[in-house]
């Protein structure tokens, strides 16, 4: 029945399956193209053959051939997106690139130590000469006046080194390589100010250049409002999707309060733009062909706004979906909202199959599906008569519906659940609606040359209330459920439980309830087994961190972390390198010690420069001297010890080193026949209770 009522759902599942297979299994591109050609012929034959099409008993042939066709479409679309099969795709294996021509695909964004920008290599110069070789690259430019003036479409000649992306170096660390690979970026490079020069400008696509230049002008318009810095940064994110200037503490406040969706232009923002334009163009509905004209204008406005806000996955999803709605409304053809949502998803995945794996894309579609599926049923449970109470109840049901369907993804990716999300949304949704209407009107008028300061002041008042409200909710941090870790299997179980429970609640059925309870027991059993396994296992790890020694020892939910104060107080670095591992191991009590302190605990013992863990004895190399027959922990940028200082079982290098320092350690280890483990090259060194690394 589901296949018949929502045929797009089947296409979406099969198309997505093809994308997943192409990303995780090596599928031959040429064979896939040949098979899709054969499948196309079979679909046409099975659809229009009188013997097959007219005979109901053979209708399954059309369904099977159609499924094979869309499955192969997913594979081929992924190959085109990744560009790995392209004839001129750059391969840096066994090739020493001396210099290359690079074109910027975006405006450089300022980071802590550099400017970061997505770019594309157009040609390379190696020992054989200059040749056309293409690939996307993540380019980091040293901060300078020249780098600050670069923009989309500029071409530069770069004579530095190009590196392949590296995978995570610590357990459960964010996989930056996979994140960029899904965006078809396979290399990275750092260019100081002496290793690049501008060749030409304005080489990009005209429509994208227009969008970026227009957004720059609108950002300058917002700066002319003279708002306080925190309000200005939120305004740029709220109205134009420009989030790069928001301070970390403000970003954290919105995240902890469960209001992060406000800072990412999404369905709420695009929906407000659509409704505003729809009602402003009401007069066109009374004209001949006015409905068609209004539809065309609405679609143009939606996509212009999408371009101006950076074309993020959430904006693309919303713009595509509202485009379907606008066209359907204009043609007076109303279809299932589920087919509309999934149709927009398929269109986006055809354009960029990597969206399927993006967190924002998944959260956006999950939230919309939850609102469409659950909110009307929840709202029908109580119908208040008072208008104000009715609006309050609508916000409540929308918030709960969206949160129910997105919280498993929140636990899986962000390891937290903002239990005060309802309080935040009661406050945020009305305020952000008013902010969008007032802010967009003020922005349009200001862009025409006159700043309506009375509207700006009203906007500033609303925004101040929202920021203060979010800050108050964030201060109630004891309501934030964090440090939660679930596996992919448990993520699937949670969604199956949600589907079964709410289907039982609204439709009834003993089997649905029994299945939901069974899966809930299975989920609980999985958590208990994992917890028991972790409690029986002790672990010692030397983390791969650029600066200083970071060593952890964990046992039965308790842990010891040895690192300097600067690293421990740097929440971003600690979260990126260490905290995800702590959450996965369910460490509830963590003791921090400085590298020079002595330690006596059940997880680890330390006396001066000797560290004891189970049967292993580590020695922190100091002044080139360390105990013989121990595992040495040595700074990678230090000099190797003299031959007379004894031989270790193994040397573990921590921290960054340059080429020459690494070469000295390699030569010393080879000469003395000692195994060498470099955490910045080989990843974190991990020992478990069974003694295996």
Image (spheres, rainbow, N blue to C red):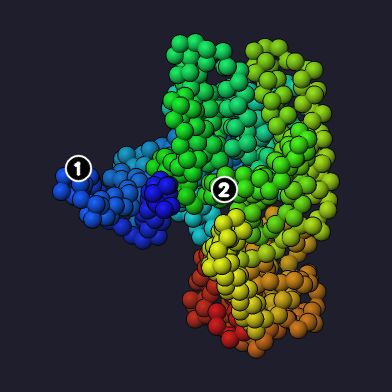
Residue 80 position in % (x across, y down): 34, 45
Helix, strand or loop for disc 2: helix
Image point (47%, 50%), residue name:
356
| Frontmost residue, 643 versus 298 | 298
| Frontmost residue, 581 versus 315 | 315
Image point (58%, 86%), residue name:
690
The residue that mark 1 highlights is 48
Residue 267 position in % (x across, y down): 59, 37
* Residue 373 disc label: 2
Seen in the image, is 121 located left or right of residue 443? left
Q: Is residue 291 above or below residue 422?
A: above
Image point (52%, 23%), residue name:
298
Res 647 visible? no
Helix, strand or loop for disc 1: helix
Seen in the image, is 90 located left or right of residue 234? left
| Frontmost residue, 533 versus 599 | 533
Label 1 packing within 10 angstroms: few (<14), some (14-19), many (20+): few
Residue 348 position in % (x across, y down): 44, 41
* Residue 578 disc label: none
C-beta proximity under 8 Å, tags 1 and 2 = no
Res 423 visible? yes
Q: Is residue 686 above or below residue 218?
A: below
Which residue occupies the extreme bottom position in the image?
Answer: 615
The image quadrant of residue 514 is bottom right
Along the polypeptide, which appears first: circle 1 or circle 2? 1
């Amino acid at each position: 029945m589901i296949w018949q009522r929502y045929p797009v759902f089947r296409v979406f599942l099969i198309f997505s399956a093809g994308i997943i297979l192409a990303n995780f299994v090596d599928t031959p591109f040429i064979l896939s193209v040949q098979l899709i050609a054969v499948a196309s012929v079979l679909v046409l034959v099975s659809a229009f053959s009188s013997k097959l099409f007219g005979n109901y008993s053979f209708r399954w042939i059309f369904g099977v051939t159609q499924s094979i066709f869309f499955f192969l479409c997913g594979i081929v679309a992924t190959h085109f997106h990744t560009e790995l099969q392209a004839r001129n795709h750059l391969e840096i294996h066994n090739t020493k690139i001396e210099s290359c021509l690079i074109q910027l695909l975006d405006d450089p964004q300022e980071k802590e130590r550099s400017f970061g920008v997505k770019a594309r290599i157009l040609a390379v110069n190696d020992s054989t000469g200059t040749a056309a070789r293409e690939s996307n690259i993540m380019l980091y430019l040293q901060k300078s006046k020249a780098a600050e003036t670069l923009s989309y479409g500029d071409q530069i000649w770069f004579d530095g080194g190009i590196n392949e992306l590296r995978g995570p170096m610590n357990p459960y660390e964010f996989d930056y390589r996979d994140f960029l690979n899904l965006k078809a970026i396979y290399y990275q490079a750092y260019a100081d100010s002496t290793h690049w020069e501008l060749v030409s400008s304005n080489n990009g696509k005209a429509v994208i250049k227009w969008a970026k230049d227009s957004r720059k002008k609108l950002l300058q318009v917002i700066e002319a409002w003279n708002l306080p810095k925190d309000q200005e940064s939120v305004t740029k994110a709220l109205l134009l999707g420009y989030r790069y200037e928001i301070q970390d503490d403000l970003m954290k406040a919105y995240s902890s309060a469960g209001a992060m969706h406000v800072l990412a232009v999404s369905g709420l923002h695009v929906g407000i733009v659509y409704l505003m334009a729809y009602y402003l163009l009401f007069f066109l509905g009374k004209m001949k062909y006015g409905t068609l004209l209004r539809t065309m204008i609405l679609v143009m406005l939606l996509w212009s706004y999408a371009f101006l806000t950076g074309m993020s996955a959430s904006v693309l999803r919303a713009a595509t979906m509202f485009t379907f709605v606008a066209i359907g409304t204009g043609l007076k053809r109303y279809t299932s909202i589920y087919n509309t949502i999934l149709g927009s998803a398929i269109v986006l995945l055809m354009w960029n199959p990597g969206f399927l794996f993006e967190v924002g894309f998944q959260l956006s579609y999950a939230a919309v599906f939850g609102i469409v599926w659950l909110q009307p049923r929840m709202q029908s449970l109580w119908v208040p008569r008072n208008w104000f109470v009715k609006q309050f109840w609508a916000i409540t049901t929308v918030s709960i519906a969206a949160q129910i369907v997105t919280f498993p993804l929140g636990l899986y990716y962000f390891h937290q659940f903002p239990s005060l999300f309802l309080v935040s949304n009661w406050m945020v949704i009305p305020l952000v609606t008013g902010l969008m209407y007032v802010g967009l009107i003020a922005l349009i008028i200001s862009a025409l040359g006159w700043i309506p300061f009375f509207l700006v002041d009203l906007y500033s008042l609303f925004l101040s209330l929202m920021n203060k409200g979010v800050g108050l909710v964030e201060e109630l941090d004891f309501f934030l459920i964090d440090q939660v870790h679930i596996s992919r299997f448990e993520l699937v179980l949670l969604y199956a439980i949600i589907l079964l429970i709410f289907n039982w609640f609204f439709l009834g059925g003993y089997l649905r309830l029994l299945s939901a309870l069974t899966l809930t027991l299975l989920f609980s059993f999985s958590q208990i087994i994992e917890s028991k396994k972790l409690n029986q296992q002790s672990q010692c790890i030397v983390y791969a961190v650029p600066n200083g020694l970071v060593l952890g020892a964990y046992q039965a939910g308790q842990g010891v972390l040895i690192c300097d104060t600067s690293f421990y107080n740097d929440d971003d670095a600690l979260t990126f390198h260490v905290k995800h591992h702590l959450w996965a191991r369910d460490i509830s009590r963590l003791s921090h010690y400085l590298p020079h302190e002595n330690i006596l605990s059940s997880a680890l013992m330390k006396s001066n420069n000797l560290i004891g863990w189970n049967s292993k004895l580590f020695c922190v190399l100091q002044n080139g001297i360390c105990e013989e027959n121990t595992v040495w922990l040595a700074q990678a940028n230090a000099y190797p010890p003299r031959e007379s200082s004894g031989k270790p079982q193994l040397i573990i290098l921590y921290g960054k080193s340059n080429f020459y320092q690494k070469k000295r350690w390699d030569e010393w280890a080879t000469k003395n026949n000692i195994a060498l483990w470099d955490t910045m090259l080989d990843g974190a060194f991990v020992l478990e209770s069974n003694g295996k690394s």
